[in-house]
Image: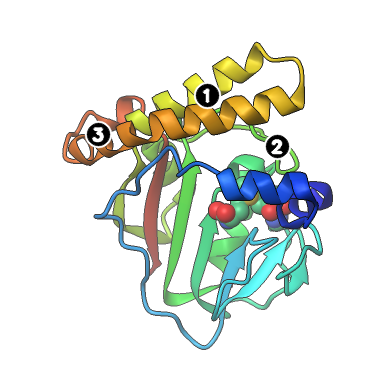
Amino acid sequence: MEDVYARRQSHDLGSRLYRALKPPDPFIRNPNEPLHFPLGRWNLYVGGGGSQPEGYINIDLFALPGVTVAADAEHLPFGSGMFQCIECDAVLEHVRHPDQVMQELSRVLAPGGYLHLVTPFCHPFHQYPKDYRRFTLDGLKQLAGGELEVVAEGWRTGPTATLLVFVSEYVKLWLPWRPWRILAHEILGWLLFPFRYLDLLFFRSNRVGIMGNHCYIWLRKR
Ligand SMILES: C[S@@+](CC[C@H](N)C(=O)[O-])C[C@H]1O[C@@H](n2cnc3c(N)ncnc32)[C@H](O)[C@@H]1O
């Protein structure tokens, strides 16, 4: 994991060239997803290694840049009811026991506090440091249990994002050398990204979940 993040921030020529030519993301975010509920005095960001989310205590399995406390989300080193807002974005697919993580997140959340979960549904295999599973909205809600009520739910990234990331990964499967894969990623990224705007039409459809890319829920502790 340290290598992955170090490569992203490296100043060698190859990395700088890669960053300069980096294509736009193959996805567009659903503009209807609420991104913030009120922050309190203490707020928790789970799995934010390599970033510095302002206003949050940032925990990650690894002591990466930006991490406040290196800890496993399955055993949080915090008292109960401590946090007003918790952000857990693209982490649950990487933990061994998501039920245990949900119990811990629910425990450290203050009554009336908010928890934001974002997870992939149709997305290629990606290890941080492992990749165990995918989630539907129903699966996320079932995981939430009874103590947390759903206040918002939906799709962050849609079916076109799914299609574009799989096309890109499929082409890379044919390429044996990393430099070729990087080149393919950049060329395809620039060619395909305009299609991402089609998802703005899909976000209005109730069929978006058939092959949506990432889903989200906002939960409030009763
Ligand atoms: C896909 S990254 C998500 C990064 C960030 N949230 C984002 O959306 O860009 C997943 C992060 O979760 C961390 N992680 C994986 N398992 C974890 C665990 N059991 N406890 C805490 N962090 C974990 C990884 O080290 C990695 O930094």
Could you say where residue 37 lies in the image, as x and y percent from the top left?
Answer: 36, 72
Q: Is residue 55 left or right of residue 121?
A: right
Give the mark nearer the N terminus: 1 vs 2: 2
Could you say where residue 101 lies in the image, as x and y percent from the top left?
Answer: 63, 53
Q: Is residue 93 left or right of residue 119?
A: right
Q: Which residue is mark 2?
A: 127
Determine if residue 212 is in view: no
Along the line of sight, which residue is nearer the eye, 2 or 75?
2
Q: Secondary structure at mark 1?
A: helix
Determine if residue 190 is in view: yes
Q: Which residue is mark 1?
A: 168
Along the line of sight, which residue is nearer the eye, 132 or 141?
132
At 58% across and 76% down in the image, what residue appears?
56
Give the mark nearer the N terminus: 2 vs 3: 2
Could you say where residue 9 lies in the image, as x and y percent from the top left?
Answer: 73, 57
Residue type, numbered disc 1: Ser
Q: Is residue 176 left or right of residue 27?
A: right
Residue type, numbered disc 3: Leu
Q: Is residue 214 left or right of residue 29?
A: right
At 26% across and 54% down in the image, what residue appears?
31
- Quarter of the figure with residue 207: top left
Along the line of sight, which residue is nearer the eye, 165 or 17?
17
Q: Which residue is mark 3?
A: 198
Q: Is residue 153 above or below residue 129?
A: below
Q: Is residue 53 above or below residue 75?
A: below
Q: Which image quadrant: the C terminus?
A: bottom left
